[in-house]
Amino acid sequence: MRLLLLAAVLGIALAARVSYDGHKVLRVNPTDDQLALLMQFKNRPGFSFRNEPRRTGANLDIMVSPEQHAAFLSFLKEKNIGFHVLFDNIQTLIEAEDRRQRSMSKVPRAISFDQYYRYDEINSYLEELAAKYPNLVTLESIGKSYEGRDMVVIKISSGGSGTRPAILIDGGIHAREWIAPATALYVIYQLVENNAANSALTDAVDWYILPVLNPDGYEYSHTADRMWRKTVSVTPISGCPGVDGNRNFGFHWNEVGASDYPCYEDYAGEVAFSEIEARNLRDFALANKEQIKLYLTFHSYGGYLLYPWGYTSELPPDWHTLQELAADASLAHVNAGGNPFIIGSSTNALYAAAGGSDDYMKGVAGIELSYTAELTNTYYGFQLPAELINETVTRFFESVRVFGRYVKENF
Ligand SMILES: *[C@@H]1O[C@H](CO)[C@@H](O)[C@H](O)[C@H]1NC(C)=O
Ligand SMILES: [Zn+2]
Protein backbone atom coordinates (compact mmCIF):
# COMPACT_ATOMS: atom_id res chain seq x y z
CA MET A 1 0.00 0.00 0.00
CA ARG A 2 2.67 2.43 1.02
CA LEU A 3 4.76 1.44 -1.95
CA LEU A 4 1.86 1.96 -4.28
CA LEU A 5 1.18 5.34 -2.78
CA LEU A 6 4.81 6.28 -3.10
CA ALA A 7 4.86 5.17 -6.72
CA ALA A 8 1.76 7.23 -7.37
CA VAL A 9 3.24 10.31 -5.73
CA LEU A 10 6.52 9.88 -7.56
CA GLY A 11 4.72 9.26 -10.81
CA ILE A 12 2.81 12.48 -10.49
CA ALA A 13 5.89 14.40 -9.49
CA LEU A 14 7.91 13.05 -12.39
CA ALA A 15 5.15 13.49 -14.90
CA ALA A 16 4.68 17.07 -13.83
CA ARG A 17 8.33 17.91 -13.99
CA VAL A 18 8.98 21.17 -15.78
CA SER A 19 11.23 20.93 -18.80
CA TYR A 20 13.58 23.73 -19.74
CA ASP A 21 14.43 22.19 -23.06
CA GLY A 22 15.71 24.86 -25.41
CA HIS A 23 15.93 27.55 -22.75
CA LYS A 24 19.07 29.55 -23.24
CA VAL A 25 20.92 31.68 -20.78
CA LEU A 26 22.28 34.87 -22.29
CA ARG A 27 24.77 37.02 -20.49
CA VAL A 28 24.75 40.72 -21.14
CA ASN A 29 26.98 43.35 -19.68
CA PRO A 30 24.69 46.34 -19.96
CA THR A 31 25.32 49.99 -19.56
CA ASP A 32 22.89 51.77 -17.25
CA ASP A 33 20.75 52.80 -20.23
CA GLN A 34 20.73 49.30 -21.65
CA LEU A 35 19.82 47.88 -18.27
CA ALA A 36 16.85 50.21 -18.11
CA LEU A 37 15.74 48.92 -21.51
CA LEU A 38 16.19 45.31 -20.50
CA MET A 39 14.16 45.70 -17.32
CA GLN A 40 10.95 45.59 -19.33
CA PHE A 41 11.55 41.87 -19.87
CA LYS A 42 11.76 41.07 -16.19
CA ASN A 43 8.86 38.83 -15.18
CA ARG A 44 7.61 38.56 -18.75
CA PRO A 45 6.49 35.06 -19.69
CA GLY A 46 9.41 33.19 -21.16
CA PHE A 47 12.01 35.32 -19.39
CA SER A 48 13.76 34.77 -16.10
CA PHE A 49 16.37 37.12 -14.75
CA ARG A 50 18.80 34.94 -12.91
CA ASN A 51 20.46 37.88 -11.24
CA GLU A 52 19.92 41.57 -11.25
CA PRO A 53 22.90 43.83 -11.22
CA ARG A 54 22.69 47.39 -10.12
CA ARG A 55 26.34 48.08 -10.18
CA THR A 56 27.48 49.43 -13.49
CA GLY A 57 29.68 46.89 -15.19
CA ALA A 58 28.10 43.81 -13.64
CA ASN A 59 26.69 41.00 -15.73
CA LEU A 60 23.04 40.24 -16.17
CA ASP A 61 22.06 36.63 -16.94
CA ILE A 62 18.73 36.16 -18.62
CA MET A 63 17.09 32.82 -19.27
CA VAL A 64 14.95 32.92 -22.40
CA SER A 65 12.43 30.35 -23.58
CA PRO A 66 12.69 29.00 -27.14
CA GLU A 67 9.46 30.82 -28.05
CA GLN A 68 10.88 34.21 -27.08
CA HIS A 69 14.38 33.68 -28.29
CA ALA A 70 14.24 35.01 -31.84
CA ALA A 71 12.32 38.16 -30.94
CA PHE A 72 14.64 38.85 -28.04
CA LEU A 73 17.72 38.47 -30.22
CA SER A 74 16.27 40.99 -32.67
CA PHE A 75 15.63 43.36 -29.81
CA LEU A 76 19.21 43.05 -28.58
CA LYS A 77 20.51 43.62 -32.07
CA GLU A 78 18.28 46.60 -32.71
CA LYS A 79 19.34 48.23 -29.44
CA ASN A 80 22.94 47.30 -30.00
CA ILE A 81 23.20 45.36 -26.78
CA GLY A 82 26.06 42.88 -26.81
CA PHE A 83 25.68 39.46 -25.24
CA HIS A 84 27.01 35.96 -25.27
CA VAL A 85 25.31 32.64 -24.86
CA LEU A 86 26.25 31.20 -21.51
CA PHE A 87 24.15 28.06 -21.98
CA ASP A 88 22.57 27.01 -25.21
CA ASN A 89 20.16 24.64 -23.51
CA ILE A 90 19.85 24.77 -19.73
CA GLN A 91 17.96 21.46 -19.72
CA THR A 92 21.21 19.69 -20.61
CA LEU A 93 22.68 20.91 -17.36
CA ILE A 94 19.60 19.89 -15.40
CA GLU A 95 19.69 16.40 -16.90
CA ALA A 96 23.38 15.97 -16.16
CA GLU A 97 22.66 16.98 -12.59
CA ASP A 98 19.80 14.47 -12.43
CA ARG A 99 21.95 11.65 -13.69
CA ARG A 100 24.56 12.37 -11.08
CA GLN A 101 22.01 12.66 -8.28
CA ARG A 102 20.56 9.30 -9.26
CA SER A 103 23.95 7.63 -9.53
CA MET A 104 24.99 8.57 -6.00
CA SER A 105 24.85 5.82 -3.45
CA LYS A 106 21.91 6.11 -1.13
CA VAL A 107 23.02 3.43 1.31
CA PRO A 108 23.92 4.84 4.69
CA ARG A 109 27.45 6.03 4.61
CA ALA A 110 29.50 8.98 5.71
CA ILE A 111 28.35 12.36 4.53
CA SER A 112 30.16 13.61 1.46
CA PHE A 113 30.21 16.82 -0.49
CA ASP A 114 29.87 15.43 -3.97
CA GLN A 115 26.08 15.40 -4.17
CA TYR A 116 23.08 17.47 -3.18
CA TYR A 117 21.13 15.85 -0.38
CA ARG A 118 17.38 15.85 -0.14
CA TYR A 119 15.51 17.28 2.84
CA ASP A 120 15.01 13.84 4.47
CA GLU A 121 18.64 12.91 4.04
CA ILE A 122 19.75 16.16 5.62
CA ASN A 123 17.51 15.64 8.62
CA SER A 124 18.66 12.03 9.01
CA TYR A 125 22.20 13.29 9.10
CA LEU A 126 21.35 15.83 11.79
CA GLU A 127 19.68 13.09 13.85
CA GLU A 128 22.73 10.90 13.44
CA LEU A 129 24.91 13.70 14.76
CA ALA A 130 22.60 14.31 17.71
CA ALA A 131 22.79 10.62 18.64
CA LYS A 132 26.54 10.40 18.18
CA TYR A 133 27.58 13.69 19.76
CA PRO A 134 25.07 14.33 22.56
CA ASN A 135 27.47 16.63 24.39
CA LEU A 136 27.86 18.91 21.43
CA VAL A 137 24.63 18.70 19.44
CA THR A 138 20.97 19.31 20.15
CA LEU A 139 18.17 19.53 17.62
CA GLU A 140 15.13 21.73 17.76
CA SER A 141 12.25 21.94 15.34
CA ILE A 142 11.41 25.61 15.18
CA GLY A 143 8.05 24.82 13.60
CA LYS A 144 6.62 23.18 10.54
CA SER A 145 6.66 24.39 6.98
CA TYR A 146 3.50 25.07 5.00
CA GLU A 147 3.34 21.43 3.92
CA GLY A 148 4.18 20.19 7.39
CA ARG A 149 7.90 19.54 7.21
CA ASP A 150 9.89 20.18 10.37
CA MET A 151 12.31 23.06 10.21
CA VAL A 152 15.20 21.65 12.17
CA VAL A 153 17.82 23.86 13.76
CA ILE A 154 20.95 22.16 14.96
CA LYS A 155 22.54 23.77 17.99
CA ILE A 156 26.23 23.15 18.32
CA SER A 157 27.49 24.06 21.76
CA SER A 158 30.32 22.75 23.83
CA GLY A 159 28.46 23.84 26.94
CA GLY A 160 30.16 26.12 29.41
CA SER A 161 28.48 28.31 31.95
CA GLY A 162 26.35 31.33 31.32
CA THR A 163 25.10 32.52 27.98
CA ARG A 164 27.64 32.51 25.26
CA PRO A 165 27.53 34.56 22.10
CA ALA A 166 26.01 32.71 19.18
CA ILE A 167 25.97 32.71 15.41
CA LEU A 168 22.80 31.98 13.46
CA ILE A 169 23.11 30.50 9.97
CA ASP A 170 20.44 29.49 7.50
CA GLY A 171 20.37 28.31 3.91
CA GLY A 172 17.94 27.62 1.16
CA ILE A 173 15.24 30.24 1.59
CA HIS A 174 15.40 30.33 -2.20
CA ALA A 175 14.63 26.78 -3.23
CA ARG A 176 16.78 26.42 -6.34
CA GLU A 177 19.96 27.69 -4.68
CA TRP A 178 21.09 24.20 -3.78
CA ILE A 179 24.61 25.14 -2.81
CA ALA A 180 23.17 27.06 0.17
CA PRO A 181 21.92 24.05 2.16
CA ALA A 182 25.05 22.16 1.05
CA THR A 183 27.25 24.87 2.52
CA ALA A 184 25.29 24.97 5.77
CA LEU A 185 25.70 21.22 5.95
CA TYR A 186 29.43 21.51 5.48
CA VAL A 187 29.70 24.03 8.30
CA ILE A 188 27.80 21.58 10.51
CA TYR A 189 30.07 18.73 9.42
CA GLN A 190 33.22 20.70 10.23
CA LEU A 191 32.02 21.99 13.57
CA VAL A 192 30.72 18.62 14.74
CA GLU A 193 32.54 15.74 13.07
CA ASN A 194 35.80 17.61 12.77
CA ASN A 195 35.49 19.32 16.09
CA ALA A 196 38.93 18.25 17.22
CA ALA A 197 40.43 20.46 14.53
CA ASN A 198 37.85 23.23 14.92
CA SER A 199 37.33 23.38 18.66
CA ALA A 200 38.51 26.99 18.73
CA LEU A 201 35.29 27.84 16.91
CA THR A 202 33.03 26.17 19.44
CA ASP A 203 34.83 26.63 22.75
CA ALA A 204 33.37 30.09 23.34
CA VAL A 205 30.66 30.48 20.71
CA ASP A 206 27.40 28.59 20.13
CA TRP A 207 26.09 27.92 16.62
CA TYR A 208 22.49 27.62 15.47
CA ILE A 209 22.22 26.32 11.93
CA LEU A 210 19.06 25.81 9.90
CA PRO A 211 20.25 24.18 6.67
CA VAL A 212 16.89 24.16 4.89
CA LEU A 213 14.82 27.25 5.57
CA ASN A 214 12.33 26.57 2.78
CA PRO A 215 11.95 22.78 2.86
CA ASP A 216 8.81 22.59 0.70
CA GLY A 217 10.34 24.72 -2.01
CA TYR A 218 13.61 22.83 -1.80
CA GLU A 219 11.88 19.50 -2.34
CA TYR A 220 9.77 21.00 -5.11
CA SER A 221 12.93 22.14 -6.87
CA HIS A 222 14.13 18.52 -6.78
CA THR A 223 10.91 16.85 -7.86
CA ALA A 224 9.01 19.28 -10.04
CA ASP A 225 10.79 22.45 -11.13
CA ARG A 226 14.54 22.87 -10.87
CA MET A 227 14.16 26.65 -11.17
CA TRP A 228 11.71 27.03 -8.29
CA ARG A 229 12.60 29.92 -6.03
CA LYS A 230 9.64 30.60 -3.77
CA THR A 231 7.69 28.88 -1.03
CA VAL A 232 4.74 26.75 -2.17
CA SER A 233 1.83 28.36 -0.31
CA VAL A 234 -1.46 29.17 -1.98
CA THR A 235 -1.78 32.73 -3.24
CA PRO A 236 -4.80 34.72 -4.43
CA ILE A 237 -4.07 33.62 -7.99
CA SER A 238 -4.57 29.95 -8.58
CA GLY A 239 -1.80 28.50 -10.69
CA CYS A 240 0.70 30.94 -9.18
CA PRO A 241 1.68 29.50 -5.82
CA GLY A 242 4.46 30.67 -3.59
CA VAL A 243 5.98 33.76 -2.06
CA ASP A 244 9.55 34.96 -2.23
CA GLY A 245 10.57 34.18 1.34
CA ASN A 246 13.31 36.75 1.17
CA ARG A 247 10.84 39.53 0.44
CA ASN A 248 8.43 38.47 3.17
CA PHE A 249 10.13 39.71 6.34
CA GLY A 250 8.43 42.54 8.18
CA PHE A 251 10.85 45.42 7.99
CA HIS A 252 10.12 48.07 5.36
CA TRP A 253 8.22 45.21 3.77
CA ASN A 254 7.39 45.53 0.05
CA GLU A 255 8.76 49.06 -0.23
CA VAL A 256 11.15 48.32 -3.05
CA GLY A 257 12.49 45.48 -5.19
CA ALA A 258 9.52 43.21 -4.60
CA SER A 259 6.28 42.54 -6.37
CA ASP A 260 2.59 42.57 -5.43
CA TYR A 261 1.77 40.12 -8.18
CA PRO A 262 1.66 36.47 -7.07
CA CYS A 263 2.91 35.12 -10.40
CA TYR A 264 6.19 36.98 -10.14
CA GLU A 265 9.30 35.46 -8.70
CA ASP A 266 9.83 38.25 -6.20
CA TYR A 267 6.25 38.28 -4.90
CA ALA A 268 6.38 39.74 -1.40
CA GLY A 269 3.24 37.98 -0.14
CA GLU A 270 -0.15 39.38 0.79
CA VAL A 271 1.20 40.74 4.06
CA ALA A 272 4.55 40.72 5.79
CA PHE A 273 5.22 37.33 7.37
CA SER A 274 2.46 35.65 5.44
CA GLU A 275 4.84 32.69 5.17
CA ILE A 276 5.09 30.26 8.06
CA GLU A 277 8.76 29.61 7.27
CA ALA A 278 9.60 33.29 7.70
CA ARG A 279 7.53 33.46 10.89
CA ASN A 280 9.25 30.41 12.34
CA LEU A 281 12.69 31.88 11.71
CA ARG A 282 11.57 35.27 13.07
CA ASP A 283 10.26 33.71 16.28
CA PHE A 284 13.39 31.67 16.78
CA ALA A 285 15.65 34.67 16.22
CA LEU A 286 13.62 36.91 18.53
CA ALA A 287 13.61 34.27 21.27
CA ASN A 288 17.43 34.08 21.09
CA LYS A 289 18.29 37.62 20.11
CA GLU A 290 20.26 38.42 23.26
CA GLN A 291 22.59 35.57 22.44
CA ILE A 292 22.86 35.84 18.67
CA LYS A 293 25.59 38.26 17.61
CA LEU A 294 25.95 37.41 13.97
CA TYR A 295 23.56 36.22 11.29
CA LEU A 296 24.57 34.60 8.02
CA THR A 297 22.07 33.63 5.34
CA PHE A 298 23.29 31.56 2.40
CA HIS A 299 22.16 32.19 -1.17
CA SER A 300 23.56 31.83 -4.66
CA TYR A 301 24.92 33.05 -6.94
CA GLY A 302 27.41 35.73 -7.84
CA GLY A 303 30.07 35.90 -5.15
CA TYR A 304 28.76 38.70 -2.96
CA LEU A 305 29.01 39.34 0.76
CA LEU A 306 26.22 41.77 1.50
CA TYR A 307 25.15 43.62 4.60
CA PRO A 308 22.08 45.80 5.26
CA TRP A 309 20.30 47.64 4.05
CA GLY A 310 18.39 46.17 1.17
CA TYR A 311 15.51 48.61 1.48
CA THR A 312 17.53 51.80 1.09
CA SER A 313 20.83 52.92 -0.33
CA GLU A 314 21.63 54.54 3.00
CA LEU A 315 24.15 52.73 5.10
CA PRO A 316 23.79 51.63 8.70
CA PRO A 317 25.93 53.63 11.16
CA ASP A 318 28.24 50.67 11.76
CA TRP A 319 28.74 49.86 8.09
CA HIS A 320 32.47 50.21 8.51
CA THR A 321 32.60 47.28 10.91
CA LEU A 322 30.38 45.24 8.61
CA GLN A 323 32.54 46.09 5.63
CA GLU A 324 35.84 45.30 7.33
CA LEU A 325 34.72 41.99 8.73
CA ALA A 326 33.41 40.97 5.31
CA ALA A 327 36.74 42.00 3.77
CA ASP A 328 38.56 39.71 6.21
CA ALA A 329 36.18 36.88 5.38
CA SER A 330 36.76 37.47 1.69
CA LEU A 331 40.51 37.45 2.15
CA ALA A 332 40.31 34.06 3.85
CA HIS A 333 38.29 32.84 0.87
CA VAL A 334 40.98 34.07 -1.50
CA ASN A 335 43.73 32.48 0.56
CA ALA A 336 41.86 29.18 0.27
CA GLY A 337 41.86 29.47 -3.51
CA GLY A 338 38.53 31.21 -4.04
CA ASN A 339 37.67 34.45 -5.72
CA PRO A 340 37.31 37.66 -3.75
CA PHE A 341 33.75 38.52 -2.82
CA ILE A 342 32.15 41.74 -3.94
CA ILE A 343 31.33 43.45 -0.68
CA GLY A 344 28.83 46.17 0.12
CA SER A 345 25.34 46.90 1.31
CA SER A 346 22.69 44.88 -0.54
CA THR A 347 21.27 47.92 -2.24
CA ASN A 348 24.57 49.37 -3.32
CA ALA A 349 26.38 46.21 -4.32
CA LEU A 350 23.51 44.20 -5.76
CA TYR A 351 20.04 45.70 -5.93
CA ALA A 352 17.41 47.26 -3.71
CA ALA A 353 15.06 44.67 -2.26
CA ALA A 354 13.04 45.13 0.90
CA GLY A 355 11.75 42.36 3.14
CA GLY A 356 14.96 40.32 3.27
CA SER A 357 15.85 38.28 6.33
CA ASP A 358 19.17 40.09 6.73
CA ASP A 359 17.51 43.51 7.03
CA TYR A 360 15.03 42.13 9.55
CA MET A 361 17.71 40.57 11.73
CA LYS A 362 19.56 43.84 11.99
CA GLY A 363 16.65 46.25 11.88
CA VAL A 364 14.26 44.48 14.24
CA ALA A 365 15.97 41.59 16.02
CA GLY A 366 18.92 43.84 16.80
CA ILE A 367 21.58 41.43 15.51
CA GLU A 368 24.17 44.00 14.51
CA LEU A 369 26.25 41.78 12.27
CA SER A 370 23.99 40.50 9.54
CA TYR A 371 25.11 39.19 6.16
CA THR A 372 23.82 37.61 3.00
CA ALA A 373 26.38 35.41 1.28
CA GLU A 374 25.77 34.95 -2.43
CA LEU A 375 27.91 31.89 -2.87
CA THR A 376 29.81 30.64 -5.87
CA ASN A 377 30.93 32.22 -9.03
CA THR A 378 28.74 33.12 -11.84
CA TYR A 379 29.14 30.63 -14.63
CA TYR A 380 26.84 27.77 -13.62
CA GLY A 381 24.47 29.84 -11.58
CA PHE A 382 21.95 27.74 -9.67
CA GLN A 383 23.04 24.53 -11.40
CA LEU A 384 26.45 24.33 -9.80
CA PRO A 385 27.63 20.82 -10.73
CA ALA A 386 27.94 18.54 -7.74
CA GLU A 387 31.62 18.02 -8.64
CA LEU A 388 32.18 21.61 -7.57
CA ILE A 389 30.41 21.46 -4.21
CA ASN A 390 33.52 20.39 -2.35
CA GLU A 391 35.75 23.22 -3.48
CA THR A 392 32.97 25.73 -2.95
CA VAL A 393 32.18 24.72 0.60
CA THR A 394 35.73 24.09 1.74
CA ARG A 395 36.81 27.52 0.58
CA PHE A 396 33.87 29.27 2.10
CA PHE A 397 34.38 27.51 5.40
CA GLU A 398 37.53 29.59 5.77
CA SER A 399 35.31 32.68 5.63
CA VAL A 400 32.98 31.19 8.21
CA ARG A 401 36.02 30.66 10.40
CA VAL A 402 36.71 34.40 10.25
CA PHE A 403 33.16 35.22 11.34
CA GLY A 404 33.43 32.72 14.18
CA ARG A 405 36.72 34.11 15.39
CA TYR A 406 35.36 37.63 15.31
CA VAL A 407 32.39 36.75 17.49
CA LYS A 408 34.64 34.90 19.91
CA GLU A 409 36.99 37.82 20.26
CA ASN A 410 34.47 40.64 20.40
CA PHE A 411 31.57 39.42 22.56
C1 LIG B 1 37.79 18.92 -1.03
O1 LIG B 1 38.51 20.12 -1.23
C2 LIG B 1 39.65 20.26 -0.39
C3 LIG B 1 40.33 21.60 -0.68
O2 LIG B 1 39.49 22.60 -1.04
C4 LIG B 1 40.61 19.13 -0.63
O3 LIG B 1 41.69 19.25 0.27
C5 LIG B 1 39.91 17.80 -0.43
O4 LIG B 1 40.77 16.76 -0.78
C6 LIG B 1 38.66 17.72 -1.29
N1 LIG B 1 37.95 16.51 -0.97
C7 LIG B 1 37.48 15.71 -1.91
C8 LIG B 1 36.77 14.49 -1.43
O5 LIG B 1 37.61 15.93 -3.08
ZN1 LIG C 1 18.64 33.79 -3.09
Image (cartoon, helix red, strand yellow):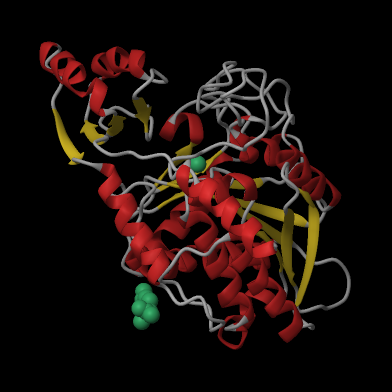
Q: Give left or right: position of 133 versus 14.
A: right
Check the image and report above or below for 403 versus 78.
below
Residue located 34% across and 17% down the image: 41
Of residues 280 and 90, the one nearer the viewer is 90
Of residues 112 and 248, the one nearer the viewer is 112
Residue located 56% across and 66% down the image: 185
Q: Position of residue 300 (x, y in %)?
A: 44, 47
Q: Give left or right: position of 70 versus 233.
A: left
Using the rendered view, name the quadrant where residue 205 is placed: bottom right
Check the image and report above or below for 223 versus 346.
below
Using the rendered view, name the quadrant where residue 226 is placed: top left
Q: Quadrant of the C terminus?
A: bottom right
Residue located 30% across and 30% down the image: 62
Work out which residue is located at the far bottom of the displayed protein and give it: 196
Q: Give left or right: position of 328 versus 132.
A: left
Q: Give left or right: position of 1 versus 289.
A: left
Q: Position of residue 22 (x, y in %)?
A: 24, 36
Q: Position of residue 91 (x, y in %)?
A: 29, 45
Camera sees residue 172: no
Q: Quadrant of the N terminus?
A: bottom right
Using the rendered view, name the quadrant where residue 47 is placed: top left
Of residues 208 and 72, the one nearer the viewer is 72
Q: Position of residue 379 (x, y in %)?
A: 27, 48
